[in-house]
């Protein structure tokens, strides 16, 4: 409910809070399941007890935004005398009732979508031979646009997978892959700037220091300035690093039950690898999770610097261009006719200042001599 209200508020403001909360409440599936659970139709049987979860809350919030916009335009024709109750009473009442009716219908296919996604992810998570494929795909999605729509789609898949946690389980492999792979872009750029400073400008190096913190906090956006400035070198590196980390997390069947937090939620990591259970599963899961992130960081950073070295040999890096421009400017001032004129003018100015100084000293000496006589 809170997610639905928050997303609706972000789209249409305060008017969307109440209907957004309602669609979030309905996305839990209790209302729909109660009405259809006793149905004799077999079409609903597979999804009995399933909710649309985060998918329902997000799509419901979009529906709320559309209803609010349409209702607001329709009520613009009301008399001015009703403006007082339009915002307080009419808008919440009408949008709430319309939202409940429409979302009850929309929620049924969303429940099936959520159920299908759960079944699809289960095929990968429960099969070690396929888990690395899931890690590869989600890893690439998390790094391709770092906070953009593809990244957010992968994140929603990870968060939605948390709805599939059965009793006795602590998390999902999908969520663990999402978080680990999302930490790699800023960490890889931070590592790259730390070990080869000659390839980077001073502001890049300073941003690299910040990316250690951003990466550890699972904030992928820290790598965006690097990707925008060096797309040919940074993008391949972070894609490789995130993909490798995602595959390793999938192979070791590492699970996570928190949707965000970075290193602060590593205590919630576990693994279903082999026959491990209890404390040994948690310890092994944490160790391999950290190892997977470190391996992806190192490989991603080394890949970035290797590509940067190729650009460095060609003299195409900004740090080289800036140094070359400064050198050319200095040489031009000395060699070119314009530069020679400038130097000559500077020399004349210096000579004039010296001559004036000498004249002043001579006059002072003469004045002292006259006074003495």
Image (cartoon, helix red, strand yellow):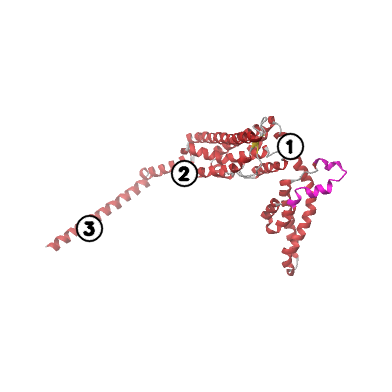
* Disc 3 secondary structure class: helix
Residue 16 position, x and y percent, is 71, 56
Between the residue at mark 1 and the residue at mark 2, the CA separation in whole angstroms equals: 46 Å
| Residue at 17% from the left image edge and 61% from the top image edge | 367
- The vertical placement of 160 against 102, above or below, is above
**Residue 316 seen in render:** no
Label 2: few (<14), some (14–19) or many (≥20) C-alpha neighbours in 10 Å: few
Between the residue at mark 3 and the residue at mark 1, the CA separation in whole angstroms equals: 94 Å
Between the residue at mark 3 and the residue at mark 2, the CA separation in whole angstroms equals: 48 Å
Left or right: residue 11 compared with residue 240: right
* Disc 1 secondary structure class: helix
Residue 222 position, x and y percent, is 56, 44
Residue 34 position, x and y percent, is 82, 48
Furthest-bottom residue in this view? 81
> Which numbered disc covers residue 120?
1
Residue 61 position, x and y percent, is 72, 52
Furthest-left residue in this view? 373
- The vertical placement of 91 against 116, above or below, is below
Mark 1 / mark 2, whichever is N-terminal: 1
- The C terminus, quarter of image: bottom left
| Residue at 76% from the left image edge and 58% from the top image edge | 95
The residue indicated by pointer 3 is 360
Answer whether labels 3 and 2 touch (C-beta < 8 Å).
no
Label 3: few (<14), some (14–19) or many (≥20) C-alpha neighbours in 10 Å: few
| Residue at 67% from the left image edge and 35% from the top image edge | 134
> Which numbered disc covers residue 212?
none
Q: Nearer the viewer, residue 262 or 120?
A: 262
Magenta-drawn segment: 23-46
The residue indicated by pointer 2 is 202
């Amino acid at each position: 409910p809170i997610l639905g209200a928050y997303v609706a508020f972000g789209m249409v403001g305060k008017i969307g809070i109440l209907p957004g909360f309602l669609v979030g409440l309905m996305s839990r599936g209790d209302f729909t399941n109660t009405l259809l659970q006793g149905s004799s139709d077999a079409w609903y049987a597979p999804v009995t007890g399933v909710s649309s979860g985060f998918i329902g809350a997000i799509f419901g919030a979009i529906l709320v935004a559309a209803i609010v916009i349409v209702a607001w335009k329709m009520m613009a024709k009301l008399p001015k005398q009703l403006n007082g109750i339009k915002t307080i009473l009419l808008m919440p009442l009408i949008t709430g009732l319309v939202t409940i009716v429409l979302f009850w219908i929309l929620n049924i296919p969303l429940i099936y979508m959520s159920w299908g996604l759960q079944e699809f992810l289960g095929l990968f998570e429960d099969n070690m031979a396929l888990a690395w494929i899931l890690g590869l795909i989600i890893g690439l999605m998390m790094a391709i646009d770092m906070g953009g729509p593809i990244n957010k789609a992968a994140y929603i898949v990870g968060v939605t997978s948390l709805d599939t946690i059965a009793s006795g389980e602590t998390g999902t492999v999908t969520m663990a892959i999402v978080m680990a792979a999302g930490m790699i872009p800023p960490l890889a750029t931070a590592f790259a700037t730390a070990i080869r400073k000659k390839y980077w400008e001073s502001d890049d190096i300073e941003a690299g220091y910040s990316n250690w913190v951003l990466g550890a906090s699972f904030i992928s956006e820290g790598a965006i300035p690097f990707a925008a400035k060096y797309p040919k070198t940074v993008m391949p590196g972070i894609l490789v690093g995130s993909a490798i980390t995602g595959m390793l997390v999938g192979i070791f069947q590492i699970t996570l039950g928190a949707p965000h937090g970075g290193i602060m939620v590593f205590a919630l990591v576990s693994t279903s690898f082999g026959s491990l259970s209890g404390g040994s599963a948690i310890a092994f899961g944490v160790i391999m999770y950290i190892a997977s992130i470190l391996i992806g960081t190192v490989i991603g950073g080394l890949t970035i610097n290797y590509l940067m070295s190729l650009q460095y040999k060609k003299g195409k890096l900004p740090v080289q261009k800036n140094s070359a421009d400064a050198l050319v400017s200095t040489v031009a001032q000395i060699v070119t006719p314009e530069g020679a004129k400038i130097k000559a003018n500077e020399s004349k100015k210096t000579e004039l200042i010296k001559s004036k100084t000498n004249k002043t000293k001579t006059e002072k000496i003469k004045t002292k001599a006259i006074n003495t006589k």
